[in-house]
Image: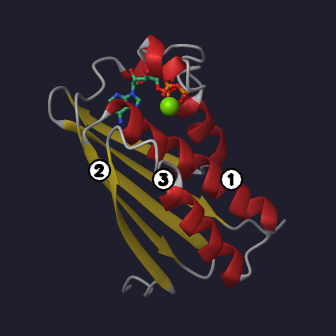
Amino acid sequence: MPEEHPLIEMEREIAGGDFQRAGDVSSELKNILQRAGFPPAFNRRVVIASYEAEMNVVIHAYRGVFRARVYSDRVHVEIDDQGPGIPDLELAFQEGYSTAPPHIREMGFGAGYGLSNMKKCSDVLVIDTRVQEGTKVVMDFFLSPSNS
Ligand SMILES: Nc1ncnc2c1ncn2[C@@H]1O[C@H](COP(=O)(O)OP(=O)(O)OP(=O)(O)O)[C@@H](O)[C@H]1O
Ligand SMILES: [Mg+2]
């Protein structure tokens, strides 16, 4: 069966360390989803997970590309970065675990809840990471019959 064509496609660069523009990409996706008329509860979980993934590039990586494909009944998001990679994924998923340095924590980041939040908010989460190369996060969100 051929892949259904997305209603909307989005591709944006994310710059590591750029706290001025941090969060802009997930805000843009939020606007797109709102305009598309998806239920607020659905949009919320897509945007929360996307924001966490975007911030992980800003905080932990050098640069990344954010891609979203919006379909009538689901949203597909990919965040592909060049960065240090994640040596121990199981450890990284633990709530409260963070390698964020003190100056990042002073800005209010680095509580160590981003990955677990992404897992809670998404229906499918796949992470492919290579130390000293980068990390690719793929998430799918399905619009459920209960509309969220
Ligand atoms: N894209 C990434 N590249 C390299 N390391 C990452 C990446 N994403 C997460 N990590 C590693 O996994 C750890 C846990 O990530 P997580 O998002 O759960 O917490 P955090 O980013 O440290 O803090 P928070 O998300 O609560 O602000 C990070 O501290 C970091 O060591
Ligand atoms: Mg994080």
Give how far across and how far down residue 54 sits, in percent. Answer: 45, 47
Picture quarter with the N terminus: bottom left
In this view, 63 is above or below 74 = above
Residue at mark 2 = 64
Q: Residue at x 48, y 53 (%)?
A: 139
User: Whole-Å distance between the Cαs marked 1 and 3?
Assistant: 11 Å
Residue 7, placed above or below residue 146: below
Mark 3 and mark 2 lie on one chain; the one further toward the N terminus is: 2
Q: Secondary structure at mark 1?
A: helix
Amino acid on which disc 2 is placed: Gly
Question: In the image shown, does 34 or 86 lie closer to the viewer?
Answer: 34
Q: Position of residue 39 (x, y in %)?
A: 79, 71
Q: As drawn, is 23 to the left or to the right of 66?
A: right
| Mark number, residue 139 | 3
Examine the image and state in which quarter residue 92 appears: top left
Q: Nearer the viewer, residue 145 or 101?
A: 101
Mark 3: which amino acid? Answer: Met
Q: Residue at x 72, y 56 (%)?
A: 44
Q: How is the image coloured?
A: secondary structure
> For numbered disc 2, what is the local secondary structure?
strand
Counting residues from the start of the chain, the first of labels 1 and 3 encountered is: 1
* Residue 133 in the image: above or below residue 6: above
- Whether label 2 lies within 8 Å of ligand 1 gets the answer yes
Of circles 3 and 2, which is in front?
2
**At 46% from the left edge and 52% from the top edge, which residue is drawn?**
21
Number of residues whose C-alpha sits closer than 10 Å to that of mark 2, classed few (under 14), some (14–19) or many (20 or more): many
Q: CA distance from mark 3 to mark 2?
A: 15 Å
Give the mark, 1 or 2, whose residue is nearer the N terminus. 1
